[in-house]
Amino acid sequence: MHLDDYIPMVGEAVVEDLKLIAQRLQGKVIRNINSTAVGGGVAEILNRMVPLLKELEIDAHWDVIRGGDKFYAVTKKIHNALHGATQEFTPDDIEAYQETQKSNLEELKSFADVMFIHDPQPAGLIQKKQELGRKWLWRCHIDLSSPQKDVWEFLRPMVEQYDAAVFSSPGFSQKLPIRQVLITPSIDPLSDKNKDLPQEFITSVLERFKIDPEKPLVTQVSRFDYLKDPLGVIEAYRLVKPYFDCQLLLVGGSATDDPEGSEVLQKVKTAAGDDPDIHVLELPPTSHLEINALQRASSVIMQKSLREGFGLTVSEALWKGKPVIAGGVGGIPLQITHKYSGILTHSVEGTAYWLKQLLQSPDFGRRLGENGREHVRENFLLTRHLRDYMLLFLSLDHPDEDVVNL
Ligand code: UDP
């Protein structure tokens, strides 16, 4: 896949612009660091962003920190607490976090002009800045607006040492003494997850997973995580089922940095019981084509999150022209304007109400999907994201200027 392949979707001017900006960054070394190579939105984006930066002759790299079960249990707690869920955060947890930062710093042999650190898991690597210098960016993908106080107080002194922090939505940020930048995430329209697929392939995937191609399919694609509310999705489906015969599909997998997954999956299976129209699929994290096909085969896509970062699955579904019913939390309202490009809900009952409406009026659903697709084309494709990141890298060399002249 090459940059020019995006021209049919975004137009030539957008791609030319990218090449122009990249000229100003030639030879710069950018090192991305996060905590998982597969599973979840961050890995999804880096997988495509890094090769495109390289094509633009920017020396981009991507490393994944290594930690044990204890570390990931702690970082999951930090994640939940920053999203506002109450967690017990102990001195022992702090020690486990710090130890992993230290061991990863020992292993990190090469540094870069820009150290681009993603999310709280590797945020502590910043302790190297004093010795090393360079520019350090903290990319926060989560909603920091109402964090548990002690956990935020633990993280904040680290964040404050960065040159800038990047958030996905204006509402996610915190008062900080450093530069804050708003950059929304994106999807890649040419990736296996989002590219067009032949109908025969979609049909074969339904067959493989024993899904009835004739009965309307309602789908949520998400890690099995309480905050994605798969149990609420099942409740909503149950309220609709007596009025409209449909199937429910919950597709998930686990990210290697998410220890809670199997517990939630178990609860989902119990809640699904023996209803033959509820399909619970656990797919390996490389199943992009399958997920693409399942999204395309769906009549309605759900993302009933209770808390959310940006919620990439919403843009993925809208790009496929699907009507989406989603929790009005996190970055989801940036993607959906209620009743114009999708439906925002805040309860099981509301979700069920709209699900029934959409199943009964496919034309309304199609209109929502079409509007959603255009909104994604304008705002949430990888090319826009790439441009924002390059401008951010450039701005680091001009710390005191509000306008950087290219
Ligand atoms: N995803 C996947 N397999 C799964 C569950 C999710 O490939 O079993 C993908 C999904 O298509 C999306 C990303 O993982 O691209 C999830 O990103 P999102 O922002 O929705 O949620 P996060 O997991 O980052 O909280």
Image (spheres, rainbow, N blue to C red):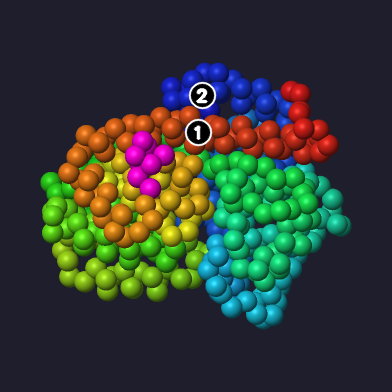
Residue 340 falls in which quadrant of the image?
top left
Is residue 287 visible in the rendered image? The answer is no
Residue type (three-letter) at the residue carrying disc 2 = Asp
Q: CA distance from mark 2 to mark 1?
A: 19 Å
Tell me, for residue 379, which label it has, or none.
1
339 drawn magenta: yes
Is residue 173 visible in the rendered image? The answer is yes
Quadrant housing the C terminus: top right
342 drawn magenta: yes
In the shown orientation, is residue 100 left or right of residue 402? Answer: left
Tag nearer the camera, 2 or 1: 1
Residue located at (44% from left, 34% from top): 376
- Say how many tags the image has: 2
Residue located at (33% from left, 63% from top): 232
Identify the magenta region. Answer: 337-344
Tell me, for residue 318, which label it has, or none.
none
In the shown orientation, is residue 303 left or right of residue 279? Answer: right
Ligand 1 under 8 Å from disc 2 Cβ: no
Residue located at (76% from left, 24% from top): 405
- Please provide percent x and percent y for residue 132: 84, 53
Residue 301, compared with residue 307, is above or below; it is above
Q: Earlier in the sequence, mark 2 or mark 1?
A: 2
In the shown orientation, is residue 202 left or right of residue 326? Answer: left
Residue 120, compared with residue 271, is above or below; it is above
Q: Which residue is mark 2?
A: 4
In this rendered view, identify the residue nearer to me: 48 or 182: 182
Residue type (three-letter) at the residue carrying disc 1 = Asn
Residue 128 falls in which quadrant of the image?
bottom right
